[in-house]
Every structure is written in structure tokens, then in C-alpha cells.
């Protein structure tokens, strides 16, 4: 079997020319065949190193299914992964679909200091494909992963390429609708607590918030980054409160950050639902444990996990796969707004 080269890399023909062998000999070496003379083997390996040729393991997966394994990559710190219920739903959905097949799933929590190890593992041919459940613009190592195995992203990648696959919600429209919900209830001094500014979902939700405010002819009271953590939400809320202009409503881009905002407001003697309206995003278990219950945008995280796994399995089976899958959201009303 012949393997296609990585985008922008040397071709198999160039390797063959450099090594002085046939194209089929290079293909056999790359595929691990023993039907190659020691001299040819050494020449091909030397040419591969000199030209930095990397075979596309996606082609190998489609034909031979040698590993029957997929990787779930979480480019986050461990405490963020275990502290955010969003990831639990995503993983549950992926596991549900993968569990119905003979594939196994290997999970890699690839924070900055572990990214090189993750790339080395994946480039070693240990899996047939990968699912990325969270990503930042700084996660450039993911491009190297996508060059050697098929990848399905949870959320729109920072730079969408024609051959990328991802499953997402319409974060812009969902945030616009959440802000519109507050506007329709008479609120005019509205702020937002966003996620990290290096994540597409965060930027999209800020855009949706801004769009709704502009359509209403209003300026935001505040836009603060809460980094999608409870502590970040509390710190962002305290910065807003210290600015001297109290919003009458707040769109918070995740339920976990909203819980932090609740704490900060309560510490200042303010009551959610009476002194300030709050709407969150996710409809995770957090939303129902707060008092008052959190009005929030429900995104189908479990379905997103299932869909990501299904798309990857379609790719690996050679079936047609949808490049961009956008799932629906809805507003769930509770007492906070």
C-alpha cells in the first residue's frame, strides 16, 4: 500500500529519488515490510530523515486498521478537566459510541508541558484517529497531530482548513439570543463574563453579546475574562463590582463561571434575581444546584460527544463524513433571570 505525504512535506517520489530506489520500495519500508534489502532499507531511512518525510497514517488506518484505537485529546490542565462538568458530558458521549465498536479509546490530558509527549505518542502510530475536546489558539501541536491521523474537533478550530472536521454549536447566535433574553426583560445595563480570549468559543460568545447590544443601541457595561473556571468567574465579577458601575444583568459564558459570580455577588450583599439578573451557558449540573436556579443556554454536550465519535468512525471506515456539524441550543428558564 502507498501512503500519501503530509501537506507541504516531501513526496514519496522525492524520497525514492534521493534513496535511489523505486517508489514501491519506499512504500514497503514505510509500511514495515521485511521484503527489503538491508542496503535499500538504510538508504530509504536516510532519505526520509534528510527530507523529513512523514507518511499520512490516515491512509494506513483506512486500509489496515492496525490499532483499533482512537485518542481523546484534552489540551487543558488536569484541574480544569476534572473541575468542569462540561468535559464529563463530552467524554460520556464519546465513550457511549466508541463502546459500541471494537475500538478502544485512549485519553490524553495534553497540557502545555505534555504536548510534545502526546505528539510523539500519536506520531508513533498508536492510534487510528483522534478527537480533540477543547483547544486554544496556542495549541499549535494539534496541527502536527492532524498531519498524521484524522482529527475531529469539539468546537470550531482556530483556523478552519478545508479538510477539517468539527462538531459545535452556533456560539455567536446562542450568545446573541441569551443577551436578547435579558434585553427583552427590560435590562439595559448589561455586562458579560467571557471565557479565555484564546478560544474560538469565547470570542464567538463575546461577538454574539456585542451584536445584541449594538442592535439594541446600547454599550456593554463590562466585558471581563473569567477563563471558564469558577474562580475566574468570581474574580471577573469582583472586577466588575469594583469598577463602580453595577450591571442590572449579566451574560456569563459558562455555568461554572456563573457559580463563581454568584459567590462574589453574595459576598457583596447582592442577590441574584433581585439585584441583578444572570444567564449562563451550558445547562450543566451546576445550573440546578445554584440558588436561585440558573437560567442558562443549554448546549447538548452529551450529543456533541456522540457526534464527534460518530464522525471519526465514519472517516476511519471510509464513509462520507460531515465536515461541520452544528448542534442546536435552547434557553432554559430558571429563577436567576
Image (spheres, rainbow, N blue to C red):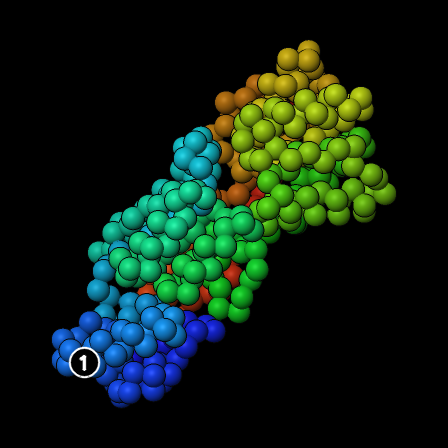
The N terminus, quarter of image:
bottom left
Which residue is at 75% across, 33% downward?
222
Image-quadrant location for residue 231: top right
Left or right side of 300 for 27: left
Which residue is at 70% across, 30% downward?
250
Q: Is disc 1 surrounded by few (<14), some (14 to 19) or many (20+) residues within 10 Å?
A: few
Image-quadrant location for residue 43: bottom left
Left or right side of 20 for 323: right
Instruction: State the SS at label 1.
Output: helix
Task: Give whichever of 328, 70 is nearer the camera.
Answer: 70
Image-quadrant location for residue 66: bottom left
The C terminus, quarter of image:
top right
Left or right side of 245 for 116: left
Considering every residue shown, the one lying at the far right of the view is 217
Counting from the top left corner in percent of width and height, residue 94 is at 36, 48
Counting from the top left corner in percent of width and height, residue 239 is at 70, 25
Counting from the top left corner in percent of width and height, residue 167 is at 49, 55
Number of dots carrying numbers: 1
Using the image, determine if residue 159 lies above or below residue 173: below
Task: Give whichever of 267, 126 is nearer the camera.
Answer: 126
Which residue is at 55% across, 62% downward?
160
Counting from the top left corner in percent of width and height, residue 118 is at 36, 50
Task: Give whichever of 21, 97 is nearer the camera.
Answer: 21
Left or right side of 255 for 23: left
Q: Is residue 186 visible?
A: no
The residue that label 1 is drawn on is 39
Amino acid at each position: 500500500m502507498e501512503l500519501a505525504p503530509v501537506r507541504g512535506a516531501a513526496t514519496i517520489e522525492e524520497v525514492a529519488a534521493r534513496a535511489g530506489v523505486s517508489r514501491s520500495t519506499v512504500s514497503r519500508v514505510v509500511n514495515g515490510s521485511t521484503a527489503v534489502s538491508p542496503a535499500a532499507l538504510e538508504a530509504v531511512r536516510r532519505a526520509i530523515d534528510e527530507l523529513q518525510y512523514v507518511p499520512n497514517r490516515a491512509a494506513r488506518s483506512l486500509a489496515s486498521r492496525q490499532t483499533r484505537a482512537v485518542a481523546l485529546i484534552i489540551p487543558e490542565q488536569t484541574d480544569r478537566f476534572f473541575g468542569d462538568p462540561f468535559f464529563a458530558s463530552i467524554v460520556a458521549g464519546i465513550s457511549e459510541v466508541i463502546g459500541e465498536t471494537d475500538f478502544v479509546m485512549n485519553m490524553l490530558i495534553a497540557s502545555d508541558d505534555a504536548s510534545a509527549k502526546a505528539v510523539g505518542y500519536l506520531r508513533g502510530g498508536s492510534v487510528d484517529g483522534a478527537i480533540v475536546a477543547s483547544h486554544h489558539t496556542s495549541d499549535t501541536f494539534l496541527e502536527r497531530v492532524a498531519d498524521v491521523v484524522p482529527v475531529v474537533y469539539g468546537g470550531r478550530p482556530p483556523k478552519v482548513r478545508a479538510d477539517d472536521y468539527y462538531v459545535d454549536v452556533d456560539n455567536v447566535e446562542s450568545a446573541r439570543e441569551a443577551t436578547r433574553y435579558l434585553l427583552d426583560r427590560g435590562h439595559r445595563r448589561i455586562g458579560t463574563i467571557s471565557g479565555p480570549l484564546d478560544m474560538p468559543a469565547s470570542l464567538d460568545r463575546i461577538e454574539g453579546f456585542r451584536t445584541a447590544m449594538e442592535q439594541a443601541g446600547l454599550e456593554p457595561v463590562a466585558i471581563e475574562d473569567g477563563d471558564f473556571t469558577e474562580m475566574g468567574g468570581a474574580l471577573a465579577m469582583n472586577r466588575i463590582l469594583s469598577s463602580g458601575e453595577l450591571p442590572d444583568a449579566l451574560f456569563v459564558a459558562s455555568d461554572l463561571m456563573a457559580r463563581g459570580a454568584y459567590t462574589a455577588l453574595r459576598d457583596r450583599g447582592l442577590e441574584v434575581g433581585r439585584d441583578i439578573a444572570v444567564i449562563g451557558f451550558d445547562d450543566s449540573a451546576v445550573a440546578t444546584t445554584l440558588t436561585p436556579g440558573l437560567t442558562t443556554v443549554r448546549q447538548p454536550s452529551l450529543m456533541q460527544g456522540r457526534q464527534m465519535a460518530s464522525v471519526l468512525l465514519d472517516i476511519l471506515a471510509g464513509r462520507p463524513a460531515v465536515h461541520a456539524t452544528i448542534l442546536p441550543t435552547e434557553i432554559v428558564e430558571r429563577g436567576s433571570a
